[in-house]
Image (cartoon, rainbow, N blue to C red):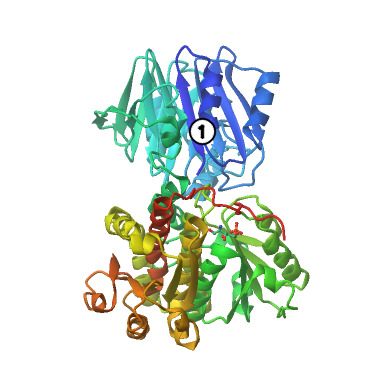
Amino acid sequence: MSGVVGYIGDKNTVEVLVAGLHRIKGHDSAGVAVVNDQGVSAVKSLGKLENLEAKLAAQPVSGAVGIGHARWATHGVPNETNAHPHFDAADEIAIVHNGIIENYQELREALQQEGVTFRSQTDSETLVHLIRKYYTGDLFKAVQQALQGVKGAWALGVVCKNNPDVLVVARQGSPLVVGFGENEAFMGSDVSAIIKYTRDVVYLDHGQVCEIRCDGIKVEDLAGNAVTPEVIHVDWDDSAAEKDGFPHFMLKEIHQQPEVIRSTLRGRISDDGCSINLSDINISEEEIKACPRISIVACGTSWHAGMVGKYLIERFAKIPVELDLASEYRYRDPIVEENSIFIPVSQSGETADTMEAIRLAKSQGAKILAVVNTVGSSVARESHGVIYQQAGPEISIASTKAYTTQVTSFVLLTLWLAQIRGTMTQDQAKEMIEHLRTLPEKVQAVLENQDPIKALAGKPKYRDAQSAFFLGRDYNYPSALEGALKLKEVSYIHAEAYPGGEVKHGPIALVTNELMVVCVAPQGNIYDKMVSNIQAIKARAGLVISIATEGDDNIQAYSDDVLYIPECYEPFTPILVAIPLQLFAYYVATNRGCDVDQPRNLAKSVIVE
Ligand code: M6R
C-alpha cells in the first residue's frame, strides 16, 4: 500500500508532488519524475521523505507535469532501484504504481523473451515495459491496451517525454482520485494528498483510465467505452482527509479490512479455485514433508493470530504446532527438533523479543518462515522465507487490519501445507477456498451494520464498566484474547480473556452484576458448550454481550445484548468476529474520551526487550 501523486499545471510541480507525498503515511522510499526539455528527469531516495527533499535541493528538477510515489514495499526490498518511478528502457516513459500485479512473473518472463531488461525486482516495473510495448504516440491508448493483459490491483500514474501536456492515470482495486484547479489538475491515491490545492475531485472507478490535461479530463474503461465522471466537492478538513474522512486511523484501518484481506489473497488462489500458491516463500515441498513440528512465536496481537494459526494447522495439515510468546520462548530452553519450522509473526517486523526468538531458533537449526507485514524489516531479513500480509502501513497503535491479515495468511499457509502433505482432499480444499473468497464481502457486511455496535458502546453500563471478561472457545478463544487486548489498550478498561470452559475453575468468583462479559459464540461445533458457559455467567447476573451468528435468536435468552455476524464457515469466524470486537473497543474508548490512536504507555514497534 504505497501512495501515488501527480500534477499538471503552472505551479512548481515538484513542490506539489512533495507536499502530496508528505501526506502519505508509512513508506520506505520515495521518488518523483517530471517531464521537461531534457526528457523525463527523476530523483529517488531511500528512507524518509526528508532524504528525497535533500536530494532535490542538491539536484533540482522541474517540469509542467510530474508524478511522485511513496513506497511501502511489497515485491523487492526497499532500495533506490526498487523505488518508483520506474522507466522503460529508453527512459522516456515513467510510472508510479500502488497495488499488486498478480501475474507479473509471467508478464516479466514474456517481456524478457522479447528482449526487455528489468532493472528492479518490483512487480510494478512490468507495467512500464508493457506500456512502452503498446506506445505509438498516444499515451492514453498505450496504458489502456497494456492494462488489458494485467491481473491485480493498481493506482497508476504515467508520464511520457513525447506527451509533455498529458498525465495518464488508471485505477483497479487501489483507490485513485483526480482533482481540479484553475487550468491545472492533480492526482493522488488519497484525497489528503491533494486537498491542500483542491476540493473538487473525481474518484476513478475500477477498470477506468483517465487522460488528464490542464483544461480537462477524458475517462474510459479498459475496453474503450467513454465514462462521464462525477465531480464531488469534498468538505473534510485537513486532518479528516489524512484519515480518509475517518476521525481516527484506528477506524480507517478497521474499514480497510475488506480491501487488505483481498490483497493478502491476491495471486494466491489458482484459477480453478482448487489450490493455493505459496511457491515464492522459499520453503521447499521436501522441507514441508519432512517437518515434524512447527513452532509459532510472536507477541501481543500477532500471538493471538498465531494461536488461530495453530488451531488451523493442527486441524487441517495435521502437523503438531507449539505456540509461544516470544519473550518466554527465548528463556525457557526450547527444544528445536531437526527439520522443524519456526514461524515468527510480526506486523512491524522489528519487535525485539520476536527477533531474539528467531535468532535462538535459527542458531539451533530451525527453518524460519515468517508471517510479516513490513517488507525489508528485520524479521523479514532474518527469515529464510516470508509470507507477506499485504496489510499496508498500520498507523494506529492498536493493531486491527494486521490481525485479520495475519489470520488470513495462516489460512493460506494451512491450505498450502495440507495440499503438500495430502491431509485434505481436493474437494475439502475447494470448499475452504470458496469460503475464503467470500470473506471480504462478509467483513464488509459487518462494517456496514455497525450502528448496533455503536449503540451498545454508548450504554453507560458498558461504557463506564470497570472490568470485563472476554470468553470464547476453540478458534474463538484467540478472538476473546484479541477482543480483551483491544478494549484494554484503547479504553483502559481492565479486561481479561478466558476459554469459556475455564471460567468455572476460578474466574467465575469475579462475576457480579457489574462485570461486562463479552461472549464470542458463533455457530459451530462448540456452540452448545459455549452457551452453557454463558448461562453460568448469566446465572450470576453478569452483563452478557454475545457475539452470535445471524438468525440465532436462542442466545438472546441468556444475553443482555447480542451483536450479530453473518453466517460464516467456522474456521474463519475469528476474522469475522474481530470486526465487532474492534469496533466495540473503538466506540467505548471514544465515548470515554480516550485518544485511541495514541494510547498511553504504548508504542507501535516495541524494539526493546
Ligand atoms: O509488530 P508486532 O506484530 O511484532 O507487534 C507485536 C505487539 O507489540 C502488537 O501486536 C501489540 O500487542 C499491539 N499494540 C496490539 O494492538
Furthest residue in direction right, as rendered: 363
Locate residue 368, reporting x and y percent. 67, 66
Name the spot of residue 113 as percent of width and height, x first.
55, 43
Residue 141: % across, % down = 37, 28
| Residue at 55% from the left image edge and 31% from the top image edge | 22
Is the distance from the Cβ of mark 1 to the nearest ligand 1 atom less than 8 Å? no
Kind of residue at badge 1: Arg
Answer with the quadrant where ligand 1 appears in the image: bottom right
Q: Is residue 293 visible?
A: yes
Estimate the x, y position of residue 1 in percent, counting from the top left.
50, 44
Quarter where residue 119 is shown:
top right
Is the residue 79 above or below the residue 530 in the image? above
**Residue 423 in view in this figure:** no
Is residue 471 depicted above or below 75 in this figure?
A: below
Of 605 and 80, the residue lying toward us: 605
Query: Quick one: 136 or 325, which is closer to the camera?
Result: 325
Q: Nearer the viewer, residue 415 or 180?
A: 180
Extreme residue in the bottom direction: 505
Residue 137 against residue 330 in the figure, above or below: above
Residue 249 located left or right of residue 29: left
Quarter where residue 450 is shown: bottom left
Q: The C terminus is located in which quarter?
A: bottom right
Q: Residues within 10 Å of mark 1 (few under 14, many from 20)?
A: many
Q: Residue at x 27, y 59 (%)?
A: 452
Query: Relative to 411, is 437 on the left or the right?
Result: left
The residue beneath circle 1 is: 23
**At 57% across and 64% down in the image, what residue appears?**
300
